[in-house]
Image (cartoon, helix red, strand yellow):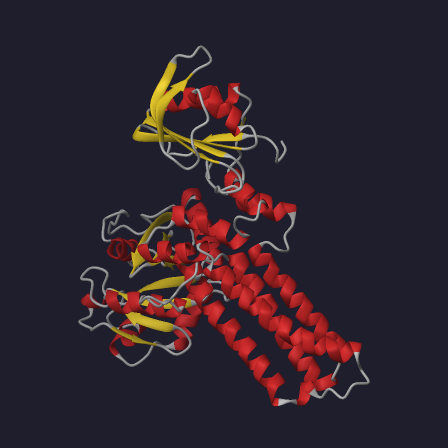
Amino acid sequence: MTDSDTIAAIASAAGRGAVGVLKISGPEVPRIAAAILGRVPDARRAHLGRFQDAQGESIDEGIAVYYPAPASFTGEHVLELQGHGGILVMDLLMQRALELGCRAARPGEFSERAFMNGKMDMAQAEAVADLIDAGTAAAARAAVRSMQGEFSGRIGELQLLITDLRVHVEALIDFPDEDIDFLASAAFTERVARLFAAFASVESAAGQGALLREGLTVVIAGKPNAGKSSLLNRLVGDDVAIVTPAPGTTRDVLRQQVHIDGLPLNLIDTAGLRVAHDAAEEEGVRRARREMQRADRILYVVDAGAAHAGAAHARAAHAAAAPEDLATELAHAQVPGGVPITVVFNKIDLIDAGPRIAGERHTEIFLSALTGAGLELLRTHLKDSAGYRDVESGALAARRRHLDALARARALVQSAAEALKTSQTVELFAEDLRLAQLALGEITGEVSSDDLLGAIFGSFCIGK
């Protein structure tokens, strides 16, 4: 496989449809167009014609559009054949392209070639995939912003601010005898403050975009019969989980995705946490604890009506939960300490208590999965705990790797500024700024490894 290969792929969705699209890109496109269409179409004009096989017989009749290099998506010659969307028709067209010397494209190879030919940077290419996969209108809008270059532009602004600092700092290194007192000036302090403000703005927009793309993974855990599956059903709005009076009904992990005002919520219902009675239940408990380790947040469900005169009733009836009782229960359940926890006191309808939110060490929400009382408190709490803003916030499609690179770059600038205050080591300050720029370059692809490129574009659909 080489970049000089001419590649082809069916770019429309699999299955039967009104229209199917075959996309071809590479240096041999003019020759292949002439063989299939009988001539090379005029550039960027829709051409109605027959798609011919090797014997000159019609495979299909449809629209052909030819984009000569470099004015195309990939920067190469590109031909799109838009025919009838039957599976057999598209397969025959693909076979014809392969007969004429094309190679079947790898997943994401068209976008990869666009990146390699300077048609888009890495952040824009990833936004193309994010737009295709968007599950909400807000996620789609964020992806369009990044695809059109807004995220890359914001990264470029950070790069320019860092470059501006480096110019002045490295002047001190190159001309140590000159009377340059820039580091002690108000202008230097202002430039550093402006840089940190720019970091905060970009990280906020990218963080919202990452939430829209990846959502919040929430594991529903607790003892048997606490109402975990009932809570899942209420949040989903459908009876997706079996609910019975018998404890231990849920044996395996059940996954559902919902949206709260545009925020994707990946809900995971788990088996009740107790000493297992058989091998199947033991495996269910093991899987529940594994999912808790991976969660962004745990909803630990407690049966508030389990004992009218006991500790659960007292917690629901009075100002706060007894911390020693709750801590003991969480310890017995082996709830991981590094994952944020919201304690949900369910079944308040059994003890004649109203919905409310309380708690100091952990947030405690009192609700009824049966009646729905308090569910809105829980939904609002989940949005707030994730830092999600449901109004139009200028979110930019971003991934975990983008947030990591931004955090490393900001930490390097912070480290450089603090080191300069304490040691006045200008050389170290300049080096940290250089490393910060390299971290930002990972986002747009200015600095990237072949392994990273392969992993990113390998996740794309074939034909894009």
- x, y percent for residue 247: 31, 52
Which is more toward the observer, 52 or 428? Answer: 52
Q: Kindly indicate the quadrant of the structure image that contains residue 262.
A: bottom left
302 vs 8, left or right, is left
Q: Quadrant of the N terminus?
A: top right
- x, y percent for residue 386: 40, 66
Which is more toward the observer, 323 or 167? Answer: 167
Q: Is residue 440 above or below residue 453?
A: below
Q: Is residue 323 above or below residue 55?
A: below
Q: Is residue 1 above or below residue 177?
A: above
- x, y percent for residue 51: 39, 21
- Answer whether residue 251 is visible to the viewer in this image: yes
177 vs 4, left or right, is right
- In the rendered image, the residue lying farthest to the right is 177
- x, y percent for residue 222: 37, 60
- Answer whether residue 253 is visible to the viewer in this image: no
Q: Kindly indicate the quadrant of the structure image that contains residue 88.
A: top left
- In the rendered image, the residue lying farthest to the front is 42
206 vs 169, left or right, is left
What number of labels is visible?
0
Q: Is residue 153 above or below residue 39?
A: below
Task: Name the residue located 42 percent from the left edge and 76 percent from the top edge.
Answer: 361
Which is more toward the observer, 37 or 262? Answer: 37
